[in-house]
Image (cartoon, grey):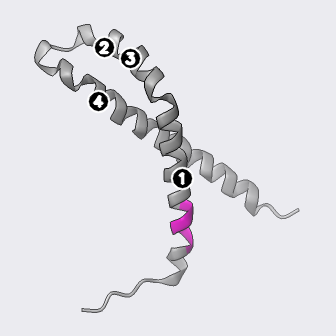
Amino acid sequence: MHIYIDPSHLASVPQFARTCALAASIANAIEFWVLRLVVPLATPALPKEFRHWLPTLVTTGTKAVVLVFAWYLQTLVSAFQSVKI
């Protein structure tokens, strides 16, 4: 079985990696503050048997939201870079 990779799709791989790296660095920068803000507020809303999962849920949710933000930011950067003056 031969797998053919279209070379035109390889141009987007560095852009995807750049977007993921941007999201990871933003998430790492704000993770402490988000945990410090959200965990005390959300702890009373969860049953006791699920409270130990709260930091994991908040961290994963933060990374997901930041990834969407970084993706949108990357589309803006790409749009500005593609404008010909």
Report the residue at 34% width, 27% height from top.
58
The residue under label 4 is which amino acid type? Leu
The answer to which quarter of the image holds residue 11 is: bottom right
According to the picture, the residue beneath numbered tag 1 turns out to be 19
Amino acid type at circle 1 is Thr
Q: Amino acid at mark 3?
A: Val
The quarter of the displayed image where residue 49 is located: top left
Q: Distance from label 2 to label 1 (Cα)?
A: 30 Å
Q: As drawn, is 53 to the left or to the right of 18?
A: left
Q: Identify the residue position indicated by label 3 in the image.
A: 38
Which of the marked residues, 2 or 1, is nearer the chain's N terminus? 1
Q: Secondary structure at mark 4?
A: helix
Q: Is residue 41 left or right of residue 51?
A: right
**Which quarter of the rendered picture does the C terminus lie within?**
bottom right
- What element does badge 3 sit on? helix
Q: Tell me whether circle 1 and circle 4 mark residues in contact (CB < 8 Å).
A: no
- Magenta stretch: dominant secondary structure: helix
Of the image marks 1 and 4, the number of the one nearer the N terminus: 1
Labels 2 and 3 touching (C-beta < 8 A):
yes
Alpha carbon separation for disc pair 4 and 2: 11 Å
Label 4 vs 3, first from the N-terminus = 3
Bounds of the magenta segment = 11-15
Q: Say which residue appears at 51% left-offset and 60% top-offset.
A: 16
